[in-house]
Amino acid sequence: MPYKIVSEECTNCAACETECPNDAINEKKSMFRIDAALCSECIGYFDEPQCIAVCPIPDCIVIDEKLPRYVA
Amino acid sequence: MPPKVIPIFAPQAAQTSGCGAKGGSGKSSCGSSAAPSDMSPEVWAKVKDHPCYSEQAHHHFARMHIAVAPACNIQCNYCNRKYDCANESRPGVVSEKLTPEMAAKKVLAVAAEIPQLSVVGIAGPGDALANPQKTFHTFNLIQQAAPDIKLCLSTNGLALPDHVQAIADLNVDHVTITINMLDPEVGERIYPWIFYNHKRWTGRDAAKILTERQMLGLEMLTAKGILVKVNSVMIPGVNDQHLAEVNKAVKSRGAFLHNIMPLISDPAHGTHYGLTGQRGPTPQELKVLQDSCEGGMNLMRHCRQCRADAVGLLGEDRGAEFTTDKIAAMDVAYDPQPRQAYRAYVERERRDQDTARASELAAMAGQAGEDKVLVAVTTKGGSRINEHFGHAGEFQIYELSGAGAKFVGHRKVEHYCQGGWGEEEILEDVTAVIKDCAAVFVSKIGLCPRKDLAAAGIEVVDAYAHEYIESSLIAWFRQRLEKDQPVAATAA
């Protein structure tokens, strides 16, 4: 599982959509989702995952700590 | 169909009495009304129809905000982006987001219904410049669809330096920047984080970057001759002592207008300040700070802190008449004629009002001494005393002195007239709101409230119903001086 947007928390502000370097985030029927096949956790692009850094709602985008970025 | 906002204006009448007609004062009504003595004619031409940049204009002209910019690049402790309630009136709140295409159609729909409309602004609900594609695409569409409507935008300033050229290219000549601090120690108590250069910054680093970007953006805008209004939120115990310094800094960089607004804070809003019990300032605290910042720069006191989707004159919101569903079903066409007629009408009204004010002032010359007195006025627009006491949703407060009548703020109240239920309680609240005023000017008032107000020491004046506010107030003040009555309440 890559990053995941919690729909109930999301305000649909679309800030993450424009920051994503992979165009992995899209809106469908007023719900934003992250395309698992495209998400790279911003590794190789930025020091921080952009969607999480820009999201105004705490814990709206959840991560899996087993993903490469979070494995020490 | 006559416009709904100000019933005294009839577009048909305005069309027939064009240039060359005589106004009520007997003066020719050609040309534009004169700029106030503290303003150049060029600046006056830019602000005279903009309700947010001119106190004078806010009596006559309407604005609308289009909510096409949902994303934001900073977090403020007074803002909660999750909250979205139709009953709330504060910045950052909207009921519906709009696409640029829908927004352009909404502008045409509102313009067709409200000839007072002069300005369309993008103020969020996030930050206009954190959504540059949506903001500028919308402006382009509006400029093509309705070229007589002015464009303006509001921003926190973080992304501003990157977009000054685009703003200038679109002929946007009004930009508002929200600047709450210069000192990072103050800033870290207002902004938990900013998103800049692909990184989330916190603490003093965040505040420092934000200030640098705001000052740079302000300088770049004023260098291009774009008028800049600076909004500051007054947060007692956080930046209240610091805002005089902010005032100096923005003044020295050429800001045109400073708008110091009270923090709106309520636990129900779910904001950090609301939840932690940070209070907003009292109207008296706000006025003291505003008074101390006056001098050498215009200070805005007529801000209603409206929603990012507000429609209408300041203080009213007709947004519910223009929901997405309703607009989608409307057939709209561009017709600037009613607005041109309305603007011509306002020009004549202004000249009449200038003349009336000048003659009352001349009659009063030398009588006033040091006396100052606050009075409250009920109005529904047009710079006239034309609202029933019981229907007023707010009072406009004027300070009367030898210098004339000066607008110093507005105070919201519940409508007194509720159809006979709960009115006593509301009247008590209303009386408390204007207790420092010597008189209240209304177009009409019932027997009961008239007695109660008199008992509270507030004179009720309905002799100037439907007349101009400023000249009426000066005339009343002069007569009061002539009677040599002691002034009951003096301005703080």
Image: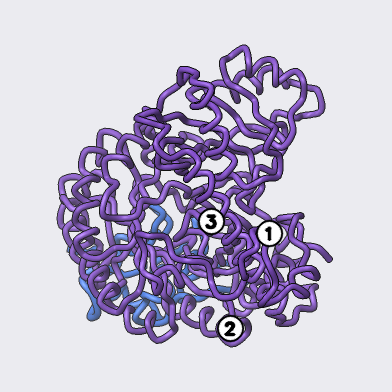
User: Which residue lies under the disc numbered 3?
Assistant: B354
- Residue depicted at x 71% and y 55%: B6
Mark 2 falls within which chain? B
- For mark 1, give the secondary structure: loop
Residue B318 at x, y percent in the picture: 68, 56
Give the Cα separation between the discs numbered 3 and 1: 12 Å
**Along the line of sight, the residue nearer the viewer: B233 or B483:** B483
**Along the line of sight, the residue nearer the viewer: B5 or A52:** B5
Q: Is residue B394 left or right of residue B481?
A: right
Mark 3 falls within which chain? B
Q: Is residue B332 left or right of residue B379?
A: right
- Position above or below: A53 against B479: below
For the residues beneath circles 3 and 1, the answer to whether they share a chain is yes
Chain B is which colour? purple
User: Which residue lies under the disc numbered 2?
Assistant: B147
- Amino acid type, mark 3: Asp
Q: Quadrant of residue A60?
A: bottom left
User: Which residue lies under the disc numbered 1?
Assistant: B24
Compare marks 3 and 2 and give the one earlier in the sequence.
Answer: 2
Residue B134 at x, y percent in the picture: 49, 77
